[in-house]
Amino acid sequence: MFFWIIKRDLLLAVRRRSDVLTTLFFFVIVVSLFPLSVGPEMNLLRTMAPGVVWVAALLASMLSLGRMFASDYIDGTLEQMLVSPQSLSLLVLGKVIAHWLVTGVPLVLMGPVLGIQYDLPGDALLVLTAVLLLGTPVLSLIGAIGAALTLGLRGGGVLVSLLVLPLYIPILIFGAGAVEANMSGMAFDAHLSLIGAFLLAAIVFAPWAAATSLRVSLE
Amino acid sequence: MMRFISPGALKMLRGIGLACARGDRELFRDINFSLKAGELLQVRGPNGSGKTSLLRMLCGLSNPAAGEIQWNSTAIRTLAGEYFTALTYIGHLNGTKDDLTALENLRISSALAGFEISDAQAVAALRQMGLKGREMLPVKVLSQGQRRRVALARLLMCKTALWILDEPLVALDVAAVNLVQGLLEQHLRQGGMIVMTTHQEIEINCALISQLQLS
């Protein structure tokens, strides 16, 4: 059943490719705006690259959060999930995995390509990919809680940003920090370990919290 | 087709002193009923009398303001997953995805309800619901009545004892109404239970139909 929900959401994403592409293009354009506006000052660009890529990734993942449960809520499929014998937390985890595959993985793949615009050295690009790979699932997991809490509310889109963005801050700090540490020749494994710890904690806690919020939102 | 059959088991749904409030307004109070195998409970009442609210409570989607709902003498709130394995709910909303085909919708919704079915089984069920030739069309191009048929096709696939149906006949034509009627009768004959609301008069031959009037 767990795989059915992932399969379903991926199938829906394939049928509605525009939703996926808007998120990706938003990320690409936001990251590309900075080199264009700052000009070809390599040193400045290199220092700001990790921060800019991460902020753009946060905003891009923010954009797609609204869709995570809203369409299922409108057509009644969410109601059916709530009365399913399968644990709701597991179904939510399935939806989050599908959401990450559709919106997170393209960011991970595009991150290093965009990093070239900032003249990042090769190994810094590798570190950037690694932290994006570890960090973007956390964004989807935490985002699911916000999306579930604001389900069916007017102006939910703005509210979800206010709820979720502050919770993204640790990922932003350690994600950007790892790349900066690598560029200044320091060890970055502590940053990676911390993001990994966030990921594990979020996998355990976030689906349960989102499932509980969904039950409250649908009452 | 294998269906729910359990001669000896004492399956029973009971509502004890149920009340529902929306804001300051009380929709209903002191609703008592009990439903045993082979029985149908028809919930009646004018618009806004709380029929859908009552059905949602029976599904465990919302909590009653007062009272308790019991399944086999245990409160459904403590049963959770175990209760859901015995329940099929078809609400106001069809619970179908517009971008998926009728076939995908039926297979996925059945799988999520705990009954994995093959393509062939799903096609057979959709044909039985009069959707021959429409299996591969996305649901968004189907008419309201056809979408309802896709949702109701789930009833052919599930092996649950308790069906909770909110206006199952809405948007259906005469042929489909007869089809659903036959389906409900068969379910009751096999010892199932049904709670439903409808504004249409339908004739169902079964041992016991009780009516619950909300005002």
Image (cartoon, coloured by chain):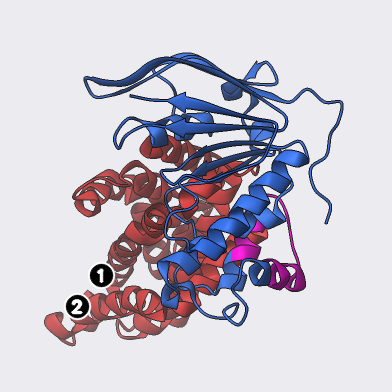
Chain colours: A red, B blue
Q: Residue at x 25, y 45 (%)?
A: A153
Provide residue B182's location: percent of width, then percent of height: 66, 52
Q: Residue at x 42, y 49 (%)?
A: B92
Chain of the residue that carries numbered disc 1 in the rendered image: A
Left or right: residue A130 versus residue B135 is left
Q: Can you see residue A120?
A: no
Q: Residue at x 58, y 80 (%)?
A: B136
Q: Answer yes or no: do the residues labelled 1 and 2 have beta carbons within 8 Å? A: yes
Q: In front: B127, or A203? A: B127
Q: Residue at x 25, y 70 (%)?
A: A48
Q: Answer above or below: position of B8 versus A63.
A: above
Residue type at tag 2: Phe
Magenta stretch, residue numbers: B106-125
Q: Which residue is mark 2?
A: A34
Q: Which residue is mark 1?
A: A48
For marks 1 and 2, the one nearer the N-term is 2
Residue type at tag 1: Met
Provide residue A58's location: percent of width, then percent of height: 32, 61
Q: Answer above or below: position of B114 versus B171.
A: above
